[in-house]
Amino acid sequence: MKKMTEAQLSELETDLNAIRDEVLADLGERDARYIRRMVRLHRSLEAGGRIMMPFGFLPPVFVAATATLGIAKILENMEIGHNVMHGQYDWMNDPSLHSQTYEWDTVCTGDSWRRTHNYEHHTYTNIIGKDRDYGYAVLRLTDDEPWKPWHTLQFINYILLSVLFQWGVGLHELETEKLRSREISWREKLPFLKEFARKGGRQAFKDYVFFPLLTFPVAPIVLAGNVGANLIRNLWSSTVIFCGHFTQDAETFTEEECEGESKGHWYLRQLTGSSNFTGGRWLHILSGHLSYQVEHHVFPDLPAHRYPEISGKVQAVCRKHGIHYNTGSFAKQYGTVVKRVLRYSLPERLMGMARAA
Amino acid sequence: MLPRETQHKALQWLGRQLFNRNDPEAFFDPLLERINPMWVQEYTPARVEQILSETRDTKTLVLKPARRWSGFRAGQHVNICVEVDGIRRNRTFSLSSSPLLWQDQGLVTLTIKRLPGGLVTNWLHDYLQTGAVIGLGEAFGDFQIPQPARPVLFIAGGSGITPVLSQLETMAALDYRAPVTLLYFVRTRDDVIAREKLLALETRYSALTLNIIASNESKEPRYLRDQDLDAVPGIKARQVYLCGPKGLMDLAQDLLFKRGFADSDIHSTFFSTPGADLGNQTLGGQVQFEGSRLEVGSEGDATLLEIAEAAGLTPRHGCRMGICHQCSCRKTTGTVINRLTGQASGPGEENIQLCISVPRGPVSLDL
């Protein structure tokens, strides 16, 4: 990681706080209108997708219905749920958009997400051993983590994780790696498992039982369409999230270098541990503006649609302090993610030999 | 056929499964609102039918609530919800119309005075227009006239007249058979709210005696005095209802207690956060927001809501005066003082209202 003195870090903190304060002072009707528009769009897409689905015996309708429902789920998870739960719209005092009570359309419960993502991941971003989102305890993505033979096949794990992403995220808090090492017991995880079963059951009931049965004669079509919609959402959200921290230049940190860190150091870690990708307006919206992962990690509770507006200022601060602002096209960033998953499936020793040869 | 209640419960359960929320009926509100704002399910929508000017700083809103609204009894209050610059604001007002108007025409009225510096009252005066839809809560409050009829004395000040208007209208319509006197204090004669209505009531309803007193027209302020009470026939037997600014209410209570009135014969309702006298206590302390992993110190009589907001948190809240319970929150340890009553809480775990709780020593909150 780039070394900065405490004085420099404190200046970085002041610079970034100024950007944040400016947005906070300006929050108002424009932001309320934006998020309500997104919620309205989500309701329309969800209703549209569900209504079209039973007519999916016509192939073009099947494709349209599945895509519509898939996009509805993406919009709800990424631009609405994730951002609302960060408290980006708490100031509106609208109970339907309140971070602590929002429940989203995915297996992971809102409460579990608030603990593992909002708290753990956003506080300990990219600290190996503390940020369990780094590789999700399934993938080895840095040499800081010792290589084990089963890492060789981790690309298969990556594909499985992406396909079943909502279930993986839902089970994230189970901390299977700690269960395996007996650091924690199954008994301790019982309350979590109960909540997981309840929410997972609810999601499965809705998409795989209720709506198919409601349209009984065409149940297999509706079931297939709903599976497809969930798959679309799973693949897209996992891809976006992987592009946020696992690109080539996204840095990792050790526990030692972050011990007792200042807010300025936390800012530096967010700037260097995250990566953006560029694209059109709708690519940003469908990624929940996680395409501005850097801005999001620096200011997780500012309304996400503001990230494009402040991106220029954040880049200027990075230039001023000589910090690398990690961005690139979606294809380029994703390419480096795939490379990273492949590369660290092999031990450092082997990679070194490959480079030498 | 299933009883309605059970059906409702089953539907609620299904709604929660499908829409992941405890009020599934509100899931499609964002769409319904666009088609017809009166179809919104999350709260009871009410359309502004008419806006009447009462005095230079008071207006009466005539509202038509959606039919599912449960109605009210004379003298009750409601929370209304309006969105000002993207932020939902809840405020409490008294209903100034009679419940009969709701039963007959489906209308209710709120009479609202512009408060200096008041965010919502000023917005309502400056921006609310006929045809707009605002949110309406269910009515609450027990500022109610005695049944069967007993002699009544109302002492009202300024905009404190609003619940009394509702009661007088109702009493007149029901031909309430007992002497009724209203002592109404206003700053100047121009500040009389609903003058025509009051005069019409006095003519129509013979049991009513009306005495309007302007407090600020002479050199010496003309406050409530003992002679005003002497002039009320059979005062000893009256049930007294107080509504107005704190100064007037304190004065009235004082005079009444001296005359030997019991607590149970005096009924009062507040219009502004009255605030108990917290002067001689050491207040403030370390406040720990456990859910947010944040600890801040506070001094003086800042409420937990103010402390939380100053610390950058955004707890749910409503009226900010201890009425609506939107800001109710679990206190895990510590003692808080209720700003309204001055009473201290227990030290243990309990639900408190952030907007009227002042920490006394260290306090931990599940927030």
Image (cartoon, rainbow, N blue to C red):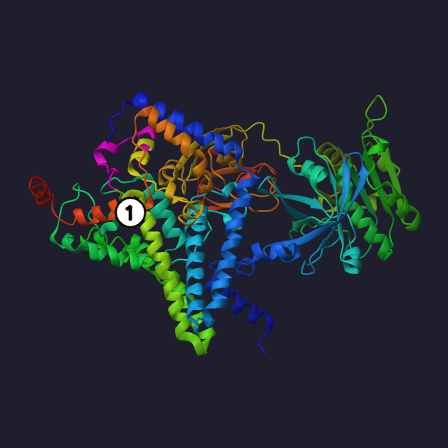
- Write the start and end of the magenta stretch as one range: A248-266
| Residue drawn at the location 63% of the way across and 34% of the way down | B275
Residue A252 is covered by the magenta coloring: yes
| Residue drawn at the location 65% of the way across and 47% of the way down | B79
Image quarter hosting the N terminus of chain B: bottom right
Q: Is residue B327 visible?
A: no
Q: Is residue A323 above or below residue A144?
A: above
Q: Assess disc 1: are there few (<14), some (14-19) or many (≥20) residues with their C-alpha within 10 Å of its C-alpha.
A: many
Image quarter hosting the C terminus of chain B: top left
Q: Find numbered disc 1 in the image and state the secondary structure of the residue it sits on.
A: helix
Task: Please name the residue that numbered disc 1 is placed on.
Answer: A334
Q: Chain of mark 1?
A: A
**Residue A22: horizontal and vertical position, in percent?**
48, 30
Residue B221 is covered by the magenta coloring: no
**Residue A235: horizontal and vertical position, in percent?**
33, 56
Q: As drawn, which residue projects farthest toward the front?
A: A60
**Residue A209: horizontal and vertical position, in percent?**
41, 71
Q: Is residue B35 visible?
A: yes
- Position of A139 with respect to B17 (left or right) is left
Name the amino acid type tagged 1: Tyr
